[in-house]
Amino acid sequence: MGSDFHSGAQFWDGAHAAWGRGWERHRDGYVHPGALSLLRPSLQMTDYRMEFMAQIENKSMSWVFRAHDVDNYYAMKLNVVAPGLRPVISVVRYTVVNGKRGRRVEIPLPVMMHKN
């Protein structure tokens, strides 16, 4: 099961009625997301693998997994710690329970990154 965003927002839910207004959809199948939304068919899954392509355009990019709803989920983020020609990045993880973010853990990633 997957989503390439060609089918629009019909399988996604957000925290409020206007959650999708900030999303920019491109005909090539990718989006610039706005507010948090969840892929409804994935909410009942207990064993899965996620694959996605993404690009950090500013300081970070994040995703949610093992979501029960928009107030209870696990989150991860790739964070640019030091920008430049060879940026340094870290991975950040935390939980959200009843809408409150839990302890944030940040781990430097020992990978060679290239700008662009």
Image (cartoon, rainbow, N blue to C red):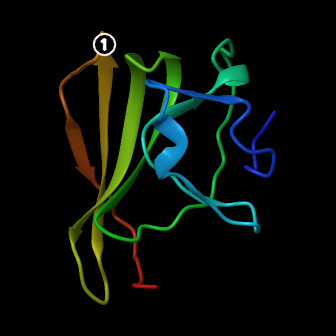
Point out residue 85 in the picture as x, y percentages from the top left corner.
Answer: 31, 90
Point out residue 4 in the picture as x, y percentages from the top left corner.
Answer: 76, 50
Toward the viewer: 109 or 76?
A: 76
Residue 58 left/right relative to 39: left
Point out residue 3 in the picture as x, y percentages from the top left corner.
Answer: 75, 42
Q: Can you tell which quarter of the image residue 80 is in? A: bottom left
- Depicted 25 relative to depicted 10: above or below: below
Toward the viewer: 96 or 38?
A: 38
Residue 87 left/right relative to 28: left
Label 1: state its secondary structure.
strand
- Depicted 81 relative to depicted 67: above or below: below
- Depicted 72 relative to depicted 12: above or below: above
Residue 57 left/right relative to 40: left
The local crowd at label 1, few if under 14, some if 14 to 19, many if 20 or more residues have their Cα within 10 Å, is some
- Depicted 114 relative to depicted 17: above or below: below
> Mark 1 highlights which residue?
97
Q: Can you tell which quarter of the image residue 48 is in? A: top right
Mark 1: amino acid: Val
Point out residue 31 in the picture as x, y percentages from the top left corner.
Answer: 60, 58
Toward the viewer: 105 or 69?
A: 69
Q: Residue at 51% of width from left, 20% of height from top?
A: 67
Q: How many marks?
A: 1
Residue 56 left/right relative to 102: right
Q: Residue at 29% of width from left, 30% of height from top?
A: 94
Q: Residue at 63% of width from left, 17% of height from top?
A: 43
Identify the image quadrant of the N terminus: top right
Q: Residue at 44% of width from left, 36% of height from top?
A: 36
